[in-house]
């Protein structure tokens, strides 16, 4: 089984719909992150959580929300999807050791298309 | 504005050493430099991380000059399976810092037979 599992792998949804992307991990890491990847724009941080009671906005949090249900689970919601949220979404984890902020373990991604 | 710049693409041949340089002129004191590898339809995979001087692990070396305004990822004796996109990441999310992570746009490395 993968260390970081994202569901679904692919999703097509209509404009205005609410959608949730889920992430679970077996790494035992306390830190979890959501990124989106767009051609020409690279990876951009949406939200991150350093523990179950900690939620922080990243550089592009508008239009998104997150929930850290447990140490191992971190979900991303698009409250009302719009076409420019079409992207590849990655969940990542890291531990809290000295340089753990930066040594991420990524999931395989969710390809989201908003039509 | 902080920026991380790397070449868009590079070509190499099997068995050669490949060096990919990342420019990060506005790096902050507490920022680390991390490199990732990404294959199609997969998430990025951690390669190596450093703060200053030289770091080496079983797959790569990372060279960081004293001014830390650039860094060079060195892949010794590449093979066809090293064909991938390589990303440079600079920044920190540590409390008390200007929490910011700056990803480069990636260098697409093609290794030819």
Image (tube, rainbow, N blue to C red):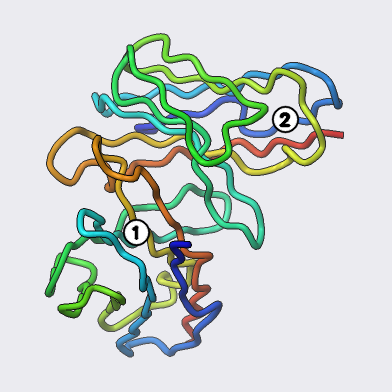
Q: How many marks?
A: 2
Residue A49, labelled with which disc? none
Where disc 2 sits, the SS reads strand
Picture residue at 33% right of the left edge, 84% below the top: B19
Q: Dot 1 lies on which element?
A: strand
Question: Which of A5/B22 is in front?
Answer: B22
For residue B68, what is the image quadrant? Answer: bottom left
Label 2 sits on residue: A11
User: What residue is shown at x 36% (from left), y 80% (from top)?
Assistant: B21
Is B73 positioned to the left or the right of A63 in the image?
A: left
Residue A60 rendering spot, x and y as whole percentages: 58, 39
Say which residue appears at 52% left-offset and 41% top-offset.
A59
Residue B91 drawn above or below residue B62 = above
Q: Nearer the viewer, residue A88 or B31?
A: B31
Left or right of residue A77: residue A106: left
Name the side, left or right, on which A68 lies relative to B73: right
Q: Chain of mark 2?
A: A
Residue bearing the label numbered 1: B90
* Tag 1–tag 2 contact (CB < 8 Å): no
The residue shown at (40%, 61%) is B37
């Amino acid at each position: 089984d993968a260390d970081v599992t994202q569901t679904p792998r692919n999703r097509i949804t209509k404009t205005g719909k609410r959608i949730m992307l889920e992430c679970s991990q077996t790494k035992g890491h306390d830190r979890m992150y959501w990124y989106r990847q767009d051609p020409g724009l690279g990876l951009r941080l949406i939200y991150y959580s350093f523990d179950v009671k900690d939620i922080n906005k990243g550089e592009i949090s508008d239009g998104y929300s997150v929930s850290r249900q447990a140490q191992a689970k971190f979900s991303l919601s698009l409250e009302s999807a719009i076409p420019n949220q079409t992207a590849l979404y990655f969940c990542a984890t890291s531990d809290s050791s000295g340089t753990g902020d930066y040594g991420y373990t990524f999931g395989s991604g969710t390809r989201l298309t908003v039509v | 504005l902080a920026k991380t710049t790397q070449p868009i693409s590079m070509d190499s041949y099997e068995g050669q050493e490949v060096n990919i340089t990342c420019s990060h002129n506005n790096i902050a004191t507490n920022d680390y430099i991390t490199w990732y590898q990404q294959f199609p339809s997969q998430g990025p995979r951690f390669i190596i991380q450093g703060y200053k001087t030289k770091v080496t692990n079983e797959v790569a070396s990372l060279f960081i000059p004293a001014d830390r305004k650039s860094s060079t990822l060195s892949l010794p004796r590449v093979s066809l399976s090293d064909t991938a996109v390589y990303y440079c990441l600079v920044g920190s999310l540590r409390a008390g810092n200007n929490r910011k992570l700056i990803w480069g746009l990636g260098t697409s490395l093609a290794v030819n037979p």
